[in-house]
Amino acid sequence: MTKIIEPLRGVHDVLPAQIAAWQHLERITREVFAGYGYEEFRVPVIEQTQLFKRSIGDFTDIVEKEMFSFVDQGEDHITLRPEATAGIVRAVISNGMLREGRLRVWCMGPMFRRERPQAGRYRQFHQIDAEAFGFEGPDIDAEIILLSARLLRRLGLTRTKLLVNSLGTPASRAAYREQLTAYFSGHESALDEDSKRRLKGNPLRILDSKNPDMQRIVAGAPLLLDSLDAESRTHFEALCAHLRSAGIEYDIEPHLVRGLDYYTRTVFEWTTDALGSQSTVCAGGRYDGLVAQLGGAGTPGIGWAMGQERRPAPGLFGAGRGTHGDRRLQTGGATARRLAGPRAANQSRRREFQDAVQACG
């Protein structure tokens, strides 16, 4: 008897019985984006490998370990997209879409990363992606976070927590990088191999380490919030005031840097405790230098991505194939919680900064 060809590890067939759940998600997504005036955009799933190396960063986990890349018969270096933002920025530049100044777009579709498959994480996965271009002030930061909050709520994800931080400008981040280099150099013997390599290339990536053995060292690192330039601090304080005005609870997480090098100023994550180790359901931030970095005119941008598999609809995949089953997310506490860091000094500085932000409201 001929041997059955099994699906690749970390990918899933969407069967007829599961289509209704996907169509429900897609319908709600379209309704929410239409209500905010965002236009649908579709870009290729394959791009030149250099696009992702230039935008995401050479010292990120995605570029170092996770991209599906190959050289085709014509000697072109091609990568299956690991995320959507870089391709959208490339598309708006190459199609001249930024000449009119401002743009709000969204897309959904498959992404590809060679990660270890586990609950909520796959090698082919699907994301909803929102991007806005041409807006400099904190109003758009608040808008795009409120958009994500609306979509999460419509999709039934309510036991969530919003984490926010500011990465400042490239100049303030360069000064912070020197502080990090000095700090981690003093602990170099305790760093894992990935962190030792990143210490020489981009020490901010150490803050994004997923190694549990690194967390004590990371917790004691200097805080970027202490190195913010005045303009970035004002921008962040205004964003926090907008969120409070809109009734959005949040926590300031000073070590939140996100896993992509193109972010500037605002970064944020929506997390939940209902997905095991994969707690992030939506994340994003500003990338004010990315358009120019990829050859376009200097244009501010901000966006987020939301994992379509990481939501509480039963039947996205068949039983026994990594499904979360009928697990539901429920409403959490009523007040914003400050994160409890392992180091008292960082806790104190974090509270001081959060109190300063609250005072500006």
Image (tube, rainbow, N blue to C red):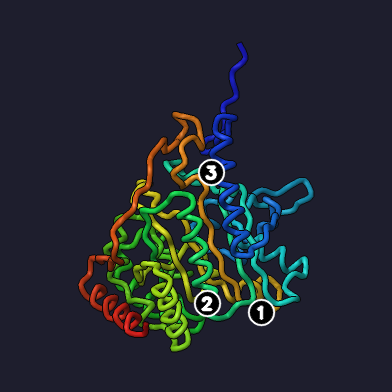
Residue 339 as seen in the image, left or right of residue 32: left
Q: Which mark is residue 298?
A: 1
Residue with the mark numbered 3? 123
Q: Nearer the viewer, residue 287 or 317?
A: 317
Q: Nearer the viewer, residue 215 or 98?
A: 98
Residue 127 as seen in the image, left or right of residue 312: right
Query: Looking at the rendering, which quadrant does residue 24 occupy?
Result: top right
Q: Which mark is residue 313?
A: none
Residue 214 as seen in the image, left or right of residue 172: left
The residue type indicated by label 2 comes to Asp
Residue 352 visible from this viewpoint: yes
Q: Residue 183 at x, y = what percent? A: 33, 75
Q: Nearer the viewer, residue 81 or 194?
A: 81
Crowd rating for badge 3 (residues with CA inside 10 Å; few <14, some 14–19, many 20+): many
Crowd rating for badge 1 (residues with CA inside 10 Å; few <14, some 14–19, many 20+): some
Residue at the image point whose x is 34% and y is 76% from the top: 223
Quadrant in which the N terminus is drawn: top right
| For discs 3 and 2, the disc positioned in front in the rendered view | 2
Give SS at disc 3: loop
Query: Looking at the rendering, which quadrant does residue 300 occupy?
Result: bottom right
Q: Residue 318 at x, y = what percent? A: 50, 30
Quadrant in which the C terminus is drawn: bottom left
Q: Residue 243 at x, y = what percent? A: 42, 72
The reply to whether dot 1 and dot 2 touch (C-beta < 8 Å) is no
Nearer the N terminus, badge 1 or badge 2?
A: 2
Report the label total: 3
The reply to whether dot 3 and dot 2 touch (C-beta < 8 Å) is no
| For discs 1 and 2, the disc positioned in front in the rendered view | 2
Give SS at disc 1: loop
Q: Which mark is residue 139?
A: 2
- Spatial separation of the CA atoms under disc 1 and disc 2: 19 Å
